[in-house]
């Protein structure tokens, strides 16, 4: 099978080399920022980056618990990463993973609360499915808008992200507000809480994310619909000639993206938080964009990118405590990685890499379609 | 009304060479693009007060030459002189500064801006350092229009104007810039005969006012009608220069199309049997809603190759798209082996036995970022044996892909390499392999060998003949007359959206067909009259 | 008046108008204050998108400059503490330096966006995303580092004092007060809207910008340097993002919090789209958006009485807050008066001579 997909060492090297170098350059840039900003804390310190990165690494991989924490942080990033990455494959830029994540979290929470007296065997799958369904429907909205009116998904999904915040706020501070709570949040979820499968905190979400990787890979590369999705993204005219239905595929793909974001939201509530607050502050849906870009929209790439960013999240606490480096350094590193990935020319010049550019897999320039008229 | 504020003060006669150096001289212009020499040592001299026609087929290198002159392309060799003075032109800005203006084949107008804004863009009259002098601009544009008796509304949005009026705006744009050398790239391509006539009047006037005018065209009667001198180029080289009085359409057609016929494939004898395709009174509109195919009818039998010859842009693209299901015909009917398939989609037609090899393989034919395997099953991926339900059967895909690669001699390291890494010829073989396979009734070949090397061309031609002999009806559409002549059993000539003549393909007279392509078969005099009257 | 209130449906509408009318002087300053950063952000977007560059990084640019304005002003304040200023608008050297630094920072970020979008010809939406993530990270990071030392704020610009003779004028008095008795950045916003609107339609710059955003090739054939114009506009657009950020930390407020722009950059984008890519339209859209926030506050704190009150309070307050975003989607989808982006928006430009 591997031979069929054309995976060989040279191809993998071509795909991985630039992201790897981008990560290296980002770590160097991060180090420079730390050194330059060190006078703000305890005076100029050249060794601060080493302390910080060692703490970051230990916090992410230094113990069994740390590794579990990395996996727990990574799993929603991977799931939400698919919400963006599958869109990329179809030539769609889904900035709305955040909104789909929130709506999925909300529908999962509502279902979990309704089934709080049921047995976990019913409550857990029902809540997860509700989360996926919520995300799916919310993701389908920009798909329908694009397919039938040509409204570009980038703007509509940005707007829907904010609408989602208010939907969540309304339901959690209104109908779903808990009885014995001091601020706007739901009661604790019991029956639908995801079981711990690894260490002290490693919940079922890890398994779901791990399972999602082969499923998405299978869908994209082994199923006929996945082939249609990829063909539409790579050459929509050829897709039309091949008898595919671009309109339907846009809606389908956006809904599928929403499903994964919704699942990410559901696992986060059911496995991690245990209840839903009205102002659920998370950036997972946005980080997912970085995950999908770094993973080059490839399921395996997204797995590794999600693990990398998950590790950074997991280690950021240790970095903050042991080296005094605020956790936001993780966002800085993410952004700088993406910068070097995008400004690939720069990376090639720095490292004198001379190999054919391998872009975002099969996707082209997405914002080209921004002003496209229906 | 006939104040001439902008016309250069040069001799206005057309017959005697001017004493002063000519406004434009190009010497030995060579421009190479990867794989093709678009201009190969071209010389061109344009005098003040003359309309100099640049005649050549599509792709002969006319537009490249003018892009070089206009600073849009950098020549690899050669020299440009303006009024005897050698110049280097590296941007349109340079060209405009030196008095060169160009009316592009595809109008360079901003649809949402007004007539006035489009005309003065880049050379804006100012009122102070920041604000535009809009009143002054309006006035100047009205005056400029009045010179030709045009009532121009400077405040109309250009996007709302008819094509003919947009053309006028383009011309005013050039005149507004105090041009001395005026280039018009196929200015009549989109005009009605009346509009064409009017443009010719304008050009003659401008000539009389002393402008040096380059008129680019592939239409013989137009060139004969309006030009003072004619330079013919073919495949990037100047092949002759003529004066209208001492030439005729036959002569020009021969120069333009060339004589050399390279018979590379023995086409053998064909044995046409039952009709596979019957097209009846087909009307098709283009993307802008203009009807570009006007009631085409023809039929095609199994085991024959029907060639459609014609200069590009005479409705062939839309006809082909209608036949393969990418475009819904406005009216008329298409029958495939006796069954009505009018308005059927591409998948339905493919199932019914229609294969299609496009010239623009990067657009419809291939997904370049996919491996060969995927491209080889691009329109069969959804059914057995390539899929079972919703699951692809990669083993079957690989097996058949490798078989096709072997059978069609696609040179590739493996069936799974990314298609973009193959050469153009091998890419096209992938398309051919896919489209020639299966239970075919009709093959539509649209410029199937465009841009390919000789070996690939020969291969594809031989495959087409093999398919013909196996009983497939083949529709070959090509702007390459040689290709049509070489392969077709019958040839239909398409001109302005209609098939104007059908001739026997064997022993067809190349010049006669060329003339039909260029004139539509009306007597040259009648055609000229239609334009001039 | 009371008679009219009893007419079915229309009566309620009249009641609503009267309710707003009574309280408008109270909520008008809230509306204006909410609109200022949104309008300025939209002007940044205007400079970008009109010349053909999509910018979804306005949020990040605003956040960066909000931080820089506050931080630099505090730093300078540490060296030259300005107690109180007798200058109009309460201008002090720290505030002025902070403002300039904020503008420069936003222009620098814009320059990166320009380089990625125009020279590298990268995906412009990805470029904007990078800016947003980076701004969120770096400002949060530095803010946390700095807060350990807790610098003293340099305060904020003051509103222009209007003589009471003017503000006491009936009807227009509060209008003048809420729109003109404002700080220097808000006033700059008002002036910028008018100036840019005029420049767009009456100046050479405006004409060329429109041409480059719609049909760059046509612009190049008449000798306009598309690349240079795009660079200039994108970088200059940073000025407005800089002003928007500075408004939050040295005019409207006087402190910085992580992520404090809170989506205003995206509302700015929405206002620009809803305002059909014109400064005046974006201004109107931003006011409308801000009004829905103002009305939400009003209903929350002073709900109307009677039937109208019942109806208004029965609508979830979140609906008012979500309204700007929903309106934008509706407009974008063309349900009411479609807003069409410049034709070349988002497409990197490649010169013919190189492309051929």
Image: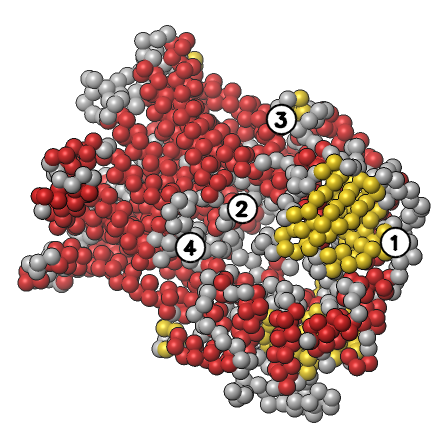
Relative horizontal placement of residue C274, taking residue B378 as reference (left or right): left
Q: Are discs 4 and 1 less than 8 Å apart at CB?
A: no
Q: Are discs 3 and 4 less than 8 Å apart at CB?
A: no
Please state the chain letter of the residue tagged with numbered disc 1 in the rendered image: B
The quarter holding residue A3 reads top right
The quarter holding residue B428 reads top right
**Residue at point 68%, 66% (across, down):** B64
Please state the chain letter of the residue tagged with numbered disc 2 in the rendered image: A
Q: Nearer the viewer, mark 1 or mark 2?
A: 1
> CA separation, marks 4 and 1?
56 Å
Relative horizontal placement of residue C260, taking residue A52 as reference (left or right): left
- Label 2 belongs to which residue? A365
> CA separation, marks 2 and 4?
17 Å
- Label 3 belongs to which residue? A222
The dot on residue C49 is: 4
Pinpoint residue B479: horizontal percent, then vertical percent.
Answer: 76, 57
> CA separation, marks 1 and 2?
46 Å
Pinpoint residue B74: horizontal percent, then vertical percent.
Answer: 65, 67
> CA separation, marks 3 and 2?
25 Å
**Residue at point 44%, 32% (across, down):** A139
**Residue at point 63%, 66% (across, down):** B191
Residue neighbourhood size for the residue with mark 2, other residues' Cα within 10 Å, grouped as few (<14), some (14–19), many (≥20)? some
Q: Is residue A274 visible?
A: yes
Residues beneath discs 3 and 4 located on the same chain: no
Residues beneath discs 3 and 1 located on the same chain: no
């Amino acid at each position: 099978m591997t031979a069929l997909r054309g995976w060989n060492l040279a191809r993998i090297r071509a795909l991985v080399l630039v992201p790897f170098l981008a990560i290296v350059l980002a770590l160097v840039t991060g180090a420079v920022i730390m050194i330059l900003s060190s006078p703000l804390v305890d005076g100029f310190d050249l060794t601060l980056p080493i302390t910080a990165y060692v703490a970051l690494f230990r916090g992410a991989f230094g113990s069994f618990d740390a590794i579990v924490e990395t996996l727990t942080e990574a799993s929603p990033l991977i799931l939400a990463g698919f919400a963006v990455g599958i869109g990329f494959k179809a030539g769609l830029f889904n900035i709305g993973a955040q909104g789909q994540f929130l709506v999925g979290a909300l529908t999962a929470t509502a279902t979990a609360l309704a089934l709080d007296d049921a047995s976990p065997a019913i409550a857990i799958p029902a809540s997860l499915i509700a989360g996926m369904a919520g995300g799916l429907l919310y993701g389908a909205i920009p798909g329908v808008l694009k397919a039938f009116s040509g409204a570009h998904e980038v703007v509509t999904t940005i707007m829907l992200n904010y609408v989602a915040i208010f939907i969540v706020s309304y339901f959690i501070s209104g109908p779903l507000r808990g009885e014995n709570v001091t601020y706007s949040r739901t009661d604790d979820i019991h029956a639908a809480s995801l079981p711990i499968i690894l260490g002290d905190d490693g919940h079922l979400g890890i398994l779901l994310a791990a399972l999602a990787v082969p499923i998405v890979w299978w869908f994209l590369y082994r199923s006929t619909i996945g082939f249609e999705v990829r063909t539409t993204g790579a050459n929509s005219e050829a897709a039309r000639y091949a008898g595919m239905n671009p309109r339907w595929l846009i809606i389908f793909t956006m809904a599928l993206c929403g499903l994964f974001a919704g699942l990410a939201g559901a696992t986060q509530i059911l496995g991690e938080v245990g209840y839903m607050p009205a102002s659920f502050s998370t950036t997972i849906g946005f980080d997912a964009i970085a995950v999908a870009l770094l993973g080059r929209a490839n399921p395996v790439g997204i797995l590794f990118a999600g693990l990398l960013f998950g590790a950074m999240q997991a280690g950021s606490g240790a970095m903050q405590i042991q080296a005094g480096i605020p956790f936001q350094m993780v966002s800085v590193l993410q952004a700088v990685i993406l910068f070097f990935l995008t400004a690939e020319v720069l990376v090639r010049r720095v490292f004198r890499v001379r190999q054919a550019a391998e872009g975002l897999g099969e996707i082209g320039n997405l914002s080209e379609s921004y002003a496209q008229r229906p | 009304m006939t104040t001439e504020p902008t016309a250069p003060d040069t001799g206005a006669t057309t017959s005697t060479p001017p004493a002063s150096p000519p406004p434009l001289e190009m010497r030995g212009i060579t421009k190479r693009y990867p794989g093709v020499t678009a201009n190969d040592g071209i010389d061109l001299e344009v005098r003040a007060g003359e309309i100099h026609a640049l005649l050549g087929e599509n792709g002969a290198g006319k537009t490249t030459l003018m892009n070089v002159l206009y600073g849009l392309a950098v020549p690899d060799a050669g020299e440009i002189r303006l009024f005897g003075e050698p110049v280097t032109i590296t941007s349109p800005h340079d060209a405009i500064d030196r008095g060169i203006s160009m009316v592009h084949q595809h109008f360079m107008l901003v649809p949402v801006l007004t007539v006035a804004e489009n005309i003065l863009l880049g050379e804006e009259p100012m009122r102070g350092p920041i604000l535009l002098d809009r009143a002054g601009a309006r006035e100047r544009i009205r005056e400029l229009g009045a010179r030709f008796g045009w009532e121009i509304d400077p405040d109309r949005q250009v996007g709302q104007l008819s094509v003919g009026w947009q053309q006028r705006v383009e011309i005013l744009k050039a005149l507004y810039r105090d041009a001395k050398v005026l280039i018009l790239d196929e200015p009549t391509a989109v005009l009605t005969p009346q509009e064409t006539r009017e443009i010719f009047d304008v050009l003659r006037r401008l000539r009389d006012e002393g402008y040096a005018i380059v008129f680019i065209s592939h239409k013989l009667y137009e060139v004969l009608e309006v030009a003072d001198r004619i330079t013919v180029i073919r495949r990037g080289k100047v092949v002759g220069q003529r004066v209208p009085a001492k030439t005729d359409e036959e002569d020009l057609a021969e120069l333009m199309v060339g004589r050399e016929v390279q018979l590379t494939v023995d086409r053998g004898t064909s044995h046409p049997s039952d009709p596979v395709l019957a097209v009846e009174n087909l009307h098709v509109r283009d993307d802008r809603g203009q009807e570009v195919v006007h009631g085409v009818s023809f039929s095609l039998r199994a085991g024959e190759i029907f060639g459609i010859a014609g200069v590009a842009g005479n409705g062939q693209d839309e006809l082909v798209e209608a036949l393969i299901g990418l475009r819904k015909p406005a009216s008329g009917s298409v029958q495939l082996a006796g069954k009505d398939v009018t308005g059927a989609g591409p998948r339905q037609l493919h199932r019914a036995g229609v294969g299609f090899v496009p010239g623009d393989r990067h657009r419809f034919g291939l997904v370049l970022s996919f491996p060969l395997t995927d491209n080889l099953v691009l329109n069969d991926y959804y059914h057995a044996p390539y899929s079972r339900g919703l699951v692809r059967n990669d083993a079957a895909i690989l097996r058949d892909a490798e078989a096709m690669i072997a059978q069609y001699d696609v040179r590739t390291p493996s069936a799974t390499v990314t298609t973009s890494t193959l050469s153009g010829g091998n890419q096209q073989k992938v398309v051919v392999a896919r489209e020639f396979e299966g239970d075919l009734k009709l093959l539509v070949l649209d410029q199937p060998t465009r841009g390919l090397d000789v070996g690939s061309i020969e291969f594809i031609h031989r495959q087409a003949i093999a398919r013909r002999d196996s009983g497939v009806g083949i529709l070959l559409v090509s702007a390459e007359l040689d290709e049509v002549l070489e392969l077709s059993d019958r040839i239909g000539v398409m001109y302005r959206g209609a098939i104007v003549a059908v001739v026997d393909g064997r022993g067809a007279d190349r010049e006669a067909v060329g003339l039909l392509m260029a004139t539509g078969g009306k007597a040259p005099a009648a055609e000229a009259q239609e334009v001039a009257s | 008046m009371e008679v009219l209130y009893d007419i079915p449906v229309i009566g309620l509408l009249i009641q609503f108008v009267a309710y707003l009318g009574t309280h408008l002087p109270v909520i008008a300053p809230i509306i204006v204050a909410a609109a200022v950063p949104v309008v300025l952000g939209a002007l940044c977007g205007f400079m970008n998108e009109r010349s053909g560059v999509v910018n979804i990084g306005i949020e990040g640019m605003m956040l960066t400059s909000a931080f820089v304005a506050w931080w630099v002003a505090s730093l300078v304040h540490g060296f030259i503490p300005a107690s109180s200023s007798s200058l109009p608008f309460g201008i002090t050297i720290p505030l002025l330096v902070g403002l300039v630094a904020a503008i420069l920072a936003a222009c620098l970020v814009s320059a990166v966006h320009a380089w990625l979008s125009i020279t590298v010809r990268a995906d412009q939406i990805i470029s904007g995303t990078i800016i947003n993530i980076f701004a969120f990270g770096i400002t949060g990071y530095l803010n946390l580092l700095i807060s350990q030392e807790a610098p003293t704020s340099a305060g904020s610009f003051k509103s222009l004092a209007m003589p009471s003779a003017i503000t006491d004028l009936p009807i227009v008095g509060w209008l003048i007060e809420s729109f003109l008795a404002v700080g220097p950045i808000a006033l700059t916003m008002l002036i910028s809207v008018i100036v840019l609107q005029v420049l767009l339609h009456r100046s050479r710059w405006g004409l060329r910008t429109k041409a480059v955003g719609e049909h760059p090739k046509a612009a190049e054939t008449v000798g306009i340097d598309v690349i240079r114009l795009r660079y200039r506009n994108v970088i200059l657009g940073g000025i407005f993002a800089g002003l928007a950020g500075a408004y939050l930390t040295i005019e409207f407020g006087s402190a910085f919090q992580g992520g404090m722009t809170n989506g205003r950059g995206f509302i700015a984008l929405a206002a620009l789209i809803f305002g059909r890519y014109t400064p005046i339209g974006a201004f109107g859209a931003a006011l409308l958006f801000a009004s829905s926030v103002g009305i939400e506050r009003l209903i929350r704190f002073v709900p109307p009485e009677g039937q109208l009150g019942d109806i208004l309070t029965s609508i979830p307050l979140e609906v008012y807050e979500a309204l700007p975003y929903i309106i934008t989607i509706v407009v974008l989808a063309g349900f009411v008066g479609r807003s069409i982006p410049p034709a070349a928006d988002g497409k990197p430009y490649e010169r013919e001579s190189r492309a051929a």
